[in-house]
Image (tube, coloured by chain):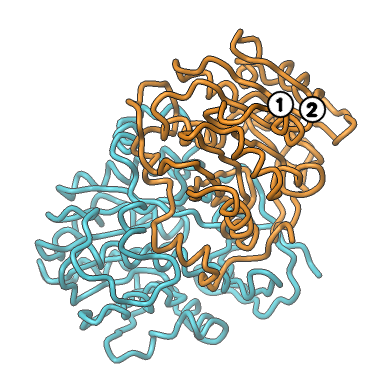
Chain colours: A cyan, B orange
Amino acid sequence: MIKFYENAPYVPMQTGYDVENILYKGKSRFQDIMVVENSDFGKMLLLDNVVQLTEADEFFYHEMLAHVVLHAQPNPKKVVVIGGGDGGVVREALKHKSIEKVWFIEIDEEVIKVSEKFFPQVASGNKDPRVEIKCMDGAEFVKMLPAKDIDAIIVDSTDIIGFARTLYTKEFFAAVRNCLKDTGMFVTHSESIIFHRDTVVKVQNILSRAFPVVDLYTAAIATYPGYWWSFSIGSVSLDPREVRQPFSIETKLYDDEMHKNAFLPRKFYKKLVEGKLGWGIRGIFE
Amino acid sequence: MIKFYENAPYVPMQTGYDVENILYKGKSRFQDIMVVENSDFGKMLLLDNVVQLTEADEFFYHEMLAHVVLHAQPNPKKVVVIGGGDGGVVREALKHKSIEKVWFIEIDEEVIKVSEKFFPQVASGNKDPRVEIKCMDGAEFVKMLPAKDIDAIIVDSTDIIGFARTLYTKEFFAAVRNCLKDTGMFVTHSESIIFHRDTVVKVQNILSRAFPVVDLYTAAIATYPGYWWSFSIGSVSLDPREVRQPFSIETKLYDDEMHKNAFLPRKFYKKLVEGKLGWGIRGIFE
C-alpha cells in the first residue's frame, strides 16, 4: 500500500489516498498521466498528480456538467465537448436522443488512449458514430466553426492553470458565442466557490462580456478539493434554470429536480458576483 | 510548519493541513482537544484529531444546522442545543428575536471552556441571559423535559461513534418527539451522503419510527470529509421545506432561498431512503 498525496494547485489542504496498485504511469507532451487503484474509489485517473476522476464518483461531475445545458434547451442536436479526454461528458451527451453530432476536442491524445484502456465504461461513447474525435486545442477548433450552428459547447478542462487557460479568456468566450445558435448554451467548470471564490467571480465576469445570460450552478464533488464545485453557464437567450424537455435519460444523480436545485439561490448569486460575499478562500488565476 | 493529518473515522481519504502553531493541546474525560492555526482556515478546533470547526468556514455548518428548523416554524421560543460545545449553533439560534430560552447541553465542559478562550466569536452567545448551559448527556437531559414544551431540538454531535451514539437511537428520538410542541422540529447532522450513505439512510429510518414527518437536507462543507454533508429532520407535523417567517437575520450563507434549495430533490430523496441509489461509499455505524 502506498499513500498518495494529491498535488492540487491553490488548495489549502492536502488529500491523501491509499493506493493499492499503480496501473499506469506515463508522460504525454502536455502532462503526467497516472492510473491508480484505491479500494473505495476504484480506478482513479490523475493528471499532473491531480485527481481527474474516480470510478466511484465520476458520474457526479460528468452528469452535472453535461445535462444542465442539454436539458435547458428544447432539442439540442450538435454538441462540442472540449477537454474531458476520459470521455465521461461525451458519454452523457450521447444519452440525449436528439443529439446528432458530438465533436470531441481533446488536446492530449494520450488521455483518450489511457482512458479507453483503463476506464472503458467512461470512454464508452468514443466509438459512437455520432462522435468525431479531434486532438487539438479547443480554442482553435471553435474559431473554425461557422456562426450560429452549435447547440451546446461544454468545456471539461483541467484546473485553470497552464494550457487550460486559453479556455477562460474573453476571446474564447466570444468565439464560442459566435458559433452557438440563438437557443445555444455554453458551460464550463469554474473551480470551487469555497476555495476559489475570486476565480468563480472572474469567470462569471468574463462570460458576461460575451453572453447576455450568465448563471452559475454547483455540485458537491468528493474528490475535487474545494468540494462545492461550480459550473458557469453562458446562454445566448434562454434562462438555463428552466428544464425544456421531459427527463427521460438514465442517470445516477442528475434529474429535472436536481437541475433546479443546483443553481445558486438568486440572492446568494447576486452577493457572490457583486463581490459582497465577504468569505471564501483564495483564487486560482489572477 | 507541521503537517497535520486528520484522523476522521470511516473516511476513504485523508486530509492534511499545514499547522503553523499548536495553540492548545489537552485531554478531557471524553476526548483529546486541540486548537491549531492554519494560514487559510485560521484557528481550527480538533476533537480526537477530527476537525470540528475552522474560523474560515464554521458558519456553513452552524448556519445550515440551526436556521432550517427555526425558519420552518412560525414563532420558535424554546430551543435545546445538544453538543456543539463551541457555541456556534447557540449563537445562530439567538439571532432569532422570537427565541426566549436556549438550553445548551454539552457533555464535555472542557470543549466549552476551550472554545470560549480560543473562539470567542463562535462562543459569543454563551453569556446571553437567554442561555442556560448544562454539562451533561443530552439524552439524559431530554428525558427530564415536560411533554410538548420545546420548539426545536438541535443536535450538533461529533461523528456517530463513541459517546455520540446515544443521540442516534430510537429511544432518544422518541424522547425528543415527546417533549416537542405540535409545531416542533428536531434536527441532527447525519454524516455524508457520498461517504456514509448507509448511515444517512439508517438515521432517516430510525427517525421515521418516532416522527410523522422526516426529511433530509444537505450542505457542502469543505472541512468535513465527505463534503456533501447531510442534516436529518424529524418534524411533529409541519413540512420543514417551507419557510414560515420572514427572513430578517444576518447570515453569510443561509437564507430563505437556500433553505428550499438545500433539501434533497423529492425523487432523489425517495431513491436514497428506499435503498435504490446504487452508489455511495461505506457507512459509519452499523
Name the secondary structure under disc 1: strand
Q: Residues within 10 Å of mark 2 (few under 14, many from 20)?
A: some
**Residue that protrudes farthest toward the top in the picture:** B129
CB-based contact (under 8 Å), mark 1 and mark 2? yes
Residue located 58% across and 46% down the image:
A11
Q: Amino acid at mark 1?
A: Ile
Question: Where residue A94 sits: x, y (%)?
Answer: 31, 80
Q: Is residue A155 above or below residue B42?
A: below
Name the secondary structure under disc 2: loop
Question: Where residue B86 sits: x, y (%)?
Answer: 68, 26
Asked where in the image residue B1 lies, by quadrant, the reply is: top right
Residue that numbered label 2 is attached to: B136
Q: Is residue B16 above or below residue B149?
A: below
Residue located 56% across and 51% down the image:
A225
**Residue that protrudes farthest toward the front in the picture:** B147
The label shown at residue B105 is 1
Residue B22 seen in render: no
Question: Where residue B111 sits: x, y (%)?
Answer: 77, 26
Q: Residues within 10 Å of mark 1 (few under 14, many from 20)?
A: many
Q: Amino acid at mark 2?
A: Met
* Precedes in sequence: disc 1 or disc 2: 1
* Relative to A234, B164 lies left or right: right
Q: Is residue B274 above or below residue A282?
A: below
